[in-house]
Image (tube, grey):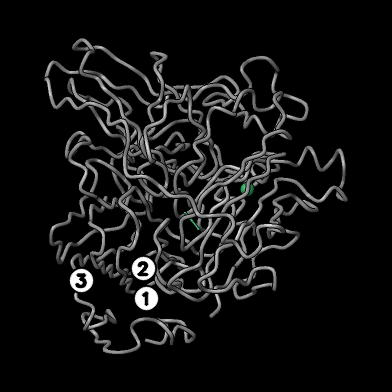
Amino acid sequence: ASAFLPAFTFCGNGSRGTMIEGNYKINASFNPDVDVEFTAIRNNIQVMSGNKTEVYSYVLNVLKADNATVENLPGSWLGPVFRVKQRQRIRVRFKNQLPRESVIHWHGLHIPPEMDGHPMYAVENGAQYVYEFEVNNRPGTYWFHPHPDKITGQQVYEGLAGMFIVEGNEDHLPTEKYDLPLIIQDRIFDGNNQLVYMQNNQMSRMQGFLGDRIAVNGTLENNIHVSKSTYRFRVLNGSNSRIYKLAWSDGSDVIVIGTDGGLLSRPVRKPYVMLAPGERIEIWKDFSEMNAEGQVYLHSLPFNDGTSMGMGGGMMGDQMMSGSGLSNGTGFDICSFTVTSESGERKSLPSAFQNISSIPESEAVNAASPRQFRFFNQRMQWVINGETFEMREVADWEKVSLNTTEVWEFINGDDGRGMGMMQDMMRMPHPVHLHGLQFQIIDRDISGVSADSWGTVEDGFIDDGWQDTFLLLPGMKVKIALKFEDFTGVYVYHCHNLEHEDMGMMRNYEVVE
Ligand code: C2O
Ligand code: CU
C-alpha cells in the first residue's frame, strides 16, 4: 500500500475528504463531470495482417461522462479522445499495470503541479494515482501522455497518448464528424510486425527516434474518406522526434485557425506549417468543391528545398533517414483524403474569432533582462544552461513568483565559449515545452538559422496565438511572455524531442508565493 503515493505528496488536493474506492484514493467532495478509469497495460493488437503487435494501451472504463465524451479512436492503438467543456471537473483513475513506473501528463492544461504528471509522481507496477482537476483552459486541442523519468519516449512510442479536446461554443465551425483529430506519429515495424524503438547508436542519440513509416490516429490506414464538406482537423505532432513541414499536395494554402492553446484571433493562410513534436495546429479544409474520388494529400515538404545536399553542417539538421523510409531531405506523404460522393456540411470560413489580447511586455518584471535558457550539447550531453534534469532540483534561475509576468528567452546554442566548429555539428532542433501554462511568443529571431540545412522556414511559424510548445531551430532565439497564476509548486520544462528529454534535457521551475 505504501507504493500508492510517494510520501511527499502530502500537499495534494486529496489530503482532505479522501476516500478509498476500489483501491483508488479519491477526493469524496470533488464531484466530477467526467470520471474514468485508465489501466495501462501491455496489449497485443492487430495492426497489420499477420502477427499481432505488442503495444501499450490505456484500457478505458467510463464511469461517468456528463455532457462530455471519452471515446477510443476506431482501430487505434492510441488512448481515447476526451471532448469536455471549460470548467468541467475531470477525474482519471490511473492504474499502472506496465512493467515499469508511469505517470500521466496533461499536456497544455493549466492544473496544479501534483495533477500535472511531474516524473516525481510516477507510480510503480500495480499502483494507482488519481488525477482530479478542473478544466481551466481556453477551448482548444490538448493531449496527454506518460512522463516517467528517462522512459517517456519509449512509453509514448508504445502507444500511450491521446487527445484532450476542450470544446467551446463553436457551431460556426465544423462540428461532430467534421471535427477530427489527426495525430501524426512515425514508427518502425520489424519483419514480425513488432515495434522497433531506439537503436542506441550515435545517430539516434543525436537526433532522437525517427521512424520509417507514418501512423495517423494510431493506425497505418493513411487514407481518410471525407465527404464534400468543410472540415476542422486538430493536428497533433505526437511523434517522438520528427518535425513536419505540413502542406497540401494541391498547392492550396494551409488555413490555420488554431494553435496549442485554442483558436487564433483570425485564420491565417500559410504555404506550409512547421509542426514540432508536442505542438498542435487546427486547420480548416474545404472539400466541398472536389469531385467524388478526388484525392488530396497532406505531406511534409523537404526542409532544404533541394538546394543543398543536406550534408555538412546540415547533416543532423536535415533529419536524414538512413536507408529507406521517410526523409525530411526529400519530403514524404503523411496521409491522403479521398472525397466520397456524399455531400455534407458546408461552412464558410469566419474572418475573425475572439480577439487574443497580448500579454503586455511592460507588465513583465524582467522585460529589460529576460531570463535566458540555452539549449545545447555539452560533452555529448543535452543540457539547458549547462544542466541536466535532477528530480527535485530547482536552481535560483528557475524560481519565479506567483502573480508575476516575465519574459523568457530561449536560445539554441551555447554562449560561444563552447567547442566552436564541433559545437556547430552538435546543433539539433529542440521543441521547447513548458508545463502548467500557456504563453505567448513575442519574438522569433531566425537570422542565425542556416538556410543550407533548413531551407525556407520563416513562413511556417504561427506566433500569434497561445502556445505551450514551440520549435527552436539551431541558431534560433525565441522570446516568450508568460504569467504565473493560480498554482504554486514545481513543474518541468524540457525539450519535447522525447529522446533528448529522456537524456536529461529537462529542468524544474518553481512558482513560489
Ligand atoms: Cu508533452 Cu512534458 O510533455
Ligand atoms: Cu532537444
The Cα atoms of the two marked residues, 3 and 1, are separated by: 22 Å
**Nearer to us in this view, 26 or 111:** 111
User: Quick one: which residue is furthest to the front in this view?
Assistant: 362
- Badge 3 marks a residue whose secondary structure is loop
Q: Quadrant of the rendered structure where residue 53 is?
A: top left
The Cα atoms of the two marked residues, 2 and 3, are separated by: 22 Å
Quickly name the residue at label 3: 32
**Nearer to us in this view, 218 or 192:** 218
CB atoms at circles 2 and 1 under 8 Å apart?
yes
Q: 10 Å neighbourhood of mark 1: few (<14), some, or many (≥20)?
A: many
The type of residue carrying mark 1 is Ala
Give the image location of residue 365, x and y in percent: 62, 65
Residue drawn at (38%, 53%) of the image = 160
The type of residue carrying mark 3 is Pro
- Badge 1 marks a residue whose secondary structure is loop
**Nearer to us in this view, 438 or 472:** 438
Residue drawn at (49%, 85%) of the image = 8
Give the image location of residue 107, x and y in percent: 42, 56
Give the image location of residue 296, x and y in percent: 33, 17
Mark number for residue 127? 1
Label 3 or label 1, whichever lies nearer to me, is: 3
Relative vertical location of residue 482 with respect to residue 74 in this rendering, above or below: below
Quickly name the residue at label 2: 96
Give the image location of residue 32, x and y in percent: 20, 71
Residue drawn at (81%, 43%) of the image = 423
